[in-house]
Amino acid sequence: MADLPAPTLPRAALERVLLRAAELQMANAEKPETLTETDLIALAEEVGISPLAVRQALAEERMRVAQPEERGLIASLAGPASFAASRIVPGNAKEILDRIDRSFQRDENLAERRRFPDRIVWGARGGFAGAVRELTRLDGRGFPLVKADEVSATVIQVEPGRVHARVETTLTRRRAVAVRNGTLGTVAGFALTNVLLVLGVFAPLTVVAGAALALGSLWLVRRNYRRDAAKAHLAIEQSLDRIEFGQPRKGGLLDQLLLNDRS
């Protein structure tokens, strides 16, 4: 009798079988609670996983920051305050971190606040130089990251010639200002309603005017903050674009003079 072909499994079933097999193996065998990276890479190779994939996963795990989902009225009204972008780029970790530093100080009007071996934190440049750069940037883009509380970048070497870069930014203060302005507008709407009622203005018109002012203020809060947040998120993605693709910078004479003065 001819041999029957070996059964095949679809991808979803294969993943379930492998996961269940791993659970059974861990339940029925004594395994160490920790492994060195070298042991983990060797173990992965035994099951056909490339060392590069393991090193990248390890780099992402070291850089992983658990950001709990924001809840509450402020987050629901305005949106999140923290944003991040990450990717694998070619290069050396120190050189890539230095390039990100130069890019942020030159293209985003930021100044270094703290420096660590694999991480840098920036804030708005401020002062006369920062104000002059903001006033003389005429391309319409502005410097969206200067509104952030802080901007940080972490770079980890995955393997020779490849690094994992992660850039993060928070806009907690910017969001707080937007919510405060919206609250003031809402209070003004209710106050207007009461004043018009006291003056004997037609009641339905009074209610409509007050409600329009209150709801309009809330809408402006959401629109203005989310616009700034979207620009900041785009800016950190673009910073990694410049690292990965080497996009040419379009700068004016003043930018070049300020950069040379800093150097």
Image (cartoon, rainbow, N blue to C red):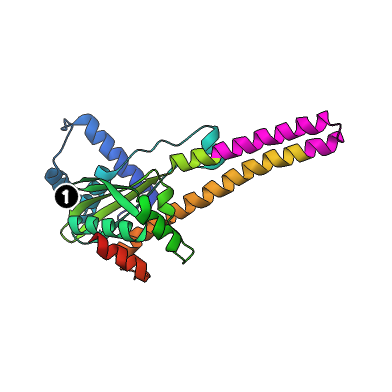
Query: Where residue 55 sits in the image (x, y, percent)?
Result: 20, 51
Q: Which contiguous range is marked in magenta?
A: 179-208
Q: What residue is shown with label 1? A: 46
Query: Where residue 49 sits in the image (x, y, percent)?
Result: 22, 52
User: Residue at horizontal 20%, vertical 53%?
Assistant: 158
User: Residue at horizontal 16%, vertical 46%?
Assistant: 43
Q: Nearer the viewer, residue 147 or 23?
A: 147
Q: Nearer the viewer, residue 173 or 169?
A: 173
**Left or right of 181 in this view: 165:** left
Report the amino acid beneath label 1. Answer: Glu
Can the viewer see residue 1 in this picture?
A: no
User: In what element is the residue under mark 1?
Assistant: helix
Residue 86 falls within the magenta-colored stretch: no
- 58 relative to 20, above or below: below
User: Residue at horizontal 34%, vertical 65%?
Assistant: 255
**Left or right of 13 in this view: 213:** right
